[in-house]
């Protein structure tokens, strides 16, 4: 069974499942915490949309999920499970933070350098499982899972050890020079040009997937690997390129978090964006434009969750719980309709 | 001289302590994967076993009751994966990933509900020295038992057949769906003992992130041990040994991060085939549904 057969096809049933999980499980959890769901969700939505700054923060969270989710979609569409977006994002952030603090350049050059560094680092980290798959047939699921942990340990080691910069504290790089920071779009917020960049990338990715030969080959490799092979598509090369691009997208996301939000690399820069992004990609049906919508929905949960905890006293973990359940629920979508005969 | 002996003994003891939860989790993974279901959710199962056993031990005052409920929780979590994999044909990777996220969050939420504080539970009645030793011995016994069951019993043969070619197994009269379901659930029960060990033998509480990726190290042990119970146990001991050495090596100037990365690097190397021929069961992770 191909990945598209597994995951393809947007149905109202899927959306219904997501809505029921979010509001059903959310309400149940709030009741367990002795909070009225009206108050809980009220605090959540108020925290996500209440003020201009809060709307900006919701878009920040949307952006942080959008980059890795688009990357995951590239891999999934090519029939490859990239569970490693988290590691790719962390290493992208490290490369961006380290180089940005290391090399003083004027803003015109510094910002592109920081973003490109993150993209390359994430891409390289994604290329490893792609190469292992293409060359040795190694299972990319386990490889990316392992490389996630290795990435975090590697970044921690480098930032504390051999690549520690003068003035850097525990597990972080010094603050980036102003020239290397992404400009704010909204005053008093962390919303930067990363958001429009992510949107443009989503449209570009859709165009590449639907309208180019490369996109066609990628989808063919995912939908019908046997037929693609017979049609002369190099599956190994496709795997390598797809995993590299996938990692590059997550790495760029890590770089924008460093350059736009934290202004330094910190080993704790991601609260699991790379994993939540799996839910985003699945809810978005692996279609870049729907992924934008899904990233916004999860962005609301992420940014509103903080207020829900602070204002209504509902632990934020409810958001992660719902996210996990959404992933489980969508793991089987459409499969019932495409039961194969073995 | 006696200091050296004492030092070696201390490292070996610590190796056993560090390896035991890995052995349980890896054995659960082996059983599940030999039947053809990849269990990425081992980490979540460890969490379920650890958290549940602490809550029940705290409520009843009996660590044994806690352990039993921890096992049931692990088996239930595995049953979700097993049901999805055998009846709905869900993608096992995606479902397992979701299980890990959900279990971690559910435990964190549960801590707040039960103990009205974030981060960690209270201390609860735990196994003493005797109980800890028993759990360590049981891990090795379980490895030998699983080895015997897989290789010497009809059910073990059925499990392996389902992992290689469920269609052929069904043609030979084996109920592949039921065999896979049972294997995954029993695997979950075994793996959850790793969580019980962590929470009630090594410590006496549950705290957020306590399992610290041991479920993933166990997955690495399954691969490094070539999908066999004894191999996975050996790999778990190997990883446990390096974990035990960590403190000494850190003092010798070797960064702890590099030591911690070792199991994961070993798994990647094994996957790439640098460590001899490594072959997963042919239908590992491939959904099988009757037409």
Image (tube, coloured by chain):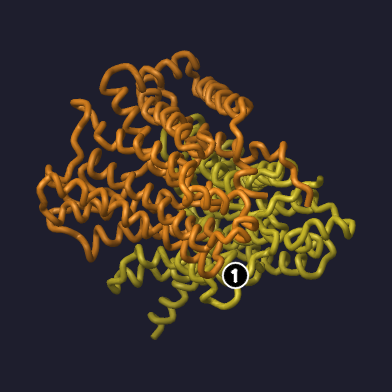
Chain colours: A orange, B yellow
Report the residue marked by disc 1.
B225
Image coordinates for residue B285, horizontal then vertical, percent: 65, 55
Give coordinates of residue A311: x percent, y percent: 36, 20
Residue B127 appears left or right of A128: right
Q: Secondary structure at mark 1?
A: loop
User: In the image, residue B149 lies at what x, y percent?
Assistant: 77, 65
Which residue is outermost to the bottom?
B1
At x 42% / y 60%, what residue is drawn? A127
The structure residue drawn at horizontal position 69% and vertical position 63%, both measured from the top left corner, is: B282
Q: Outermost residue toward the right?
A: B173
Q: Nearer the viewer, residue A226 or B185?
A: A226
A112 relative position to B155: left or right: left
In the rendered image, is residue B49 in sight?
A: no
Judge whether B257 appears above or below A74 on screen. below
Q: Compared with residue B64, is residue A292 higher up or lower down, i.e. above or below?
A: above
Asked whether residue A123 is in view, the answer is yes
């Amino acid at each position: 069974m191909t990945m598209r057969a597994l995951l393809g096809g947007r149905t109202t049933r899927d959306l219904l499942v997501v809505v029921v999980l979010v509001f059903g499980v959310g309400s149940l959890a709030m009741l367990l915490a002795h909070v009225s769901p009206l108050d809980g969700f009220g605090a959540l939505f108020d925290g996500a949309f209440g003020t201009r700054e809060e709307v900006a923060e919701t878009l920040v969270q949307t952006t942080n999920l959008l980059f890795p989710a688009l990357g995951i979609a590239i891999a999934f569409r090519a029939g490859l499970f990239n569970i490693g977006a988290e590691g790719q994002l962390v290493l992208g952030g490290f490369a961006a933070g380290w180089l940005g603090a290391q090399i003083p350049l004027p803003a015109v050059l510094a910002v592109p350098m920081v973003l490109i560094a993150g993209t390359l680092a994430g891409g390289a980290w994604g290329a490893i499982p792609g190469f292992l798959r293409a060359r040795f047939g190694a299972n990319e699921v386990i490889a990316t899972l392992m490389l996630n942990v290795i990435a975090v340990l590697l970044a921690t080691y480098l930032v504390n050890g051999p690549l520690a910069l003068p003035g850097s504290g525990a597990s972080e790089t010094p603050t980036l020079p102003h020239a290397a920071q992404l400009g704010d779009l909204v005053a008093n917020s962390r919303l930067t040009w990363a958001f429009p960049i992510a949107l443009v990338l989503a449209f570009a990715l859709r165009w590449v997937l639907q309208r180019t030969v490369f996109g066609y080959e990628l989808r063919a490799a995912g939908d019908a690997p046997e037929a693609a092979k017979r049609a002369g598509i190099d599956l190994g090369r496709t795997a390598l390129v797809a995993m590299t691009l996938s990692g590059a997208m997550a790495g760029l996301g890590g770089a924008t978090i460093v350059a736009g939000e934290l202004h330094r690399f910190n080993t704790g820069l991601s609260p699991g964006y790379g994993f939540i992004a799996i839910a985003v990609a699945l809810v978005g049906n692996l279609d870049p434009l729907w992924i934008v919508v899904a990233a916004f929905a999860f962005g609301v949960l992420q940014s509103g969750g903080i207020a829900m905890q602070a204002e209504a006293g509902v632990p934020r973990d409810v958001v992660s719980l719902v996210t996990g359940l959404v992933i489980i629920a969508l793991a089987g979508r459409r499969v019932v309709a495409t039961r194969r005969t073995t | 001289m006696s200091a050296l002996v004492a030092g070696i003994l201390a490292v070996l003891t610590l190796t056993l302590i560090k390896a035991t939860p890995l052995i349980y989790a890896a054995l659960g993974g082996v059983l599940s994967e030999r039947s053809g279901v990849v269990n990425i959710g081992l980490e979540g199962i460890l969490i379920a076993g650890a958290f549940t056993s602490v809550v029940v031990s705290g409520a009843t005052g009996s660590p044994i009751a806690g352990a039993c409920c921890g096992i049931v929780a692990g088996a239930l979590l595995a049953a979700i994966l097993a049901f999805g994999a055998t009846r709905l044909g869900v993608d096992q990777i995606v479902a397992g990933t979701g299980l890990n996220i959900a279990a971690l969050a559910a435990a964190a939420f549960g801590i707040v509900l039960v103990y009205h504080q974030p981060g960690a539970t209270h201390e609860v009645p735990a196994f003493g020295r005797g109980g800890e030793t028993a759990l360590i011995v049981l891990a090795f016994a379980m490895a030998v038992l699983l080895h015997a069951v897989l290789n010497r019993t009809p059910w073990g043969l059925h499990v392996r057949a389902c992992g290689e070619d469920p269609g052929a197994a069904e043609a030979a009269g084996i109920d592949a769906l039921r065999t896979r379901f049972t294997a995954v659930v029993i695997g979950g029960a075994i793996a959850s003992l790793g969580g019980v060990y962590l929470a009630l033998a090594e410590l006496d509480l549950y705290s957020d992130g306590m399992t610290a990726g041991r479920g993933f190290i166990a997955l690495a042990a399954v691969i490094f041990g070539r999908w066999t119970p004894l191999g996975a146990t050996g790999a778990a001991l190997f990883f446990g040994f390096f974990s035990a050495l960590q403190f000494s090596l850190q003092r010798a100037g070797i960064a702890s991060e590099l030591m911690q990365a070792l199991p994961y690097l070993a798994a990647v190397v094994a996957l790439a085939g640098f460590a001899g021929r490594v072959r997963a069961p042919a239908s590992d992770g491939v959904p099988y549904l009757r037409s």
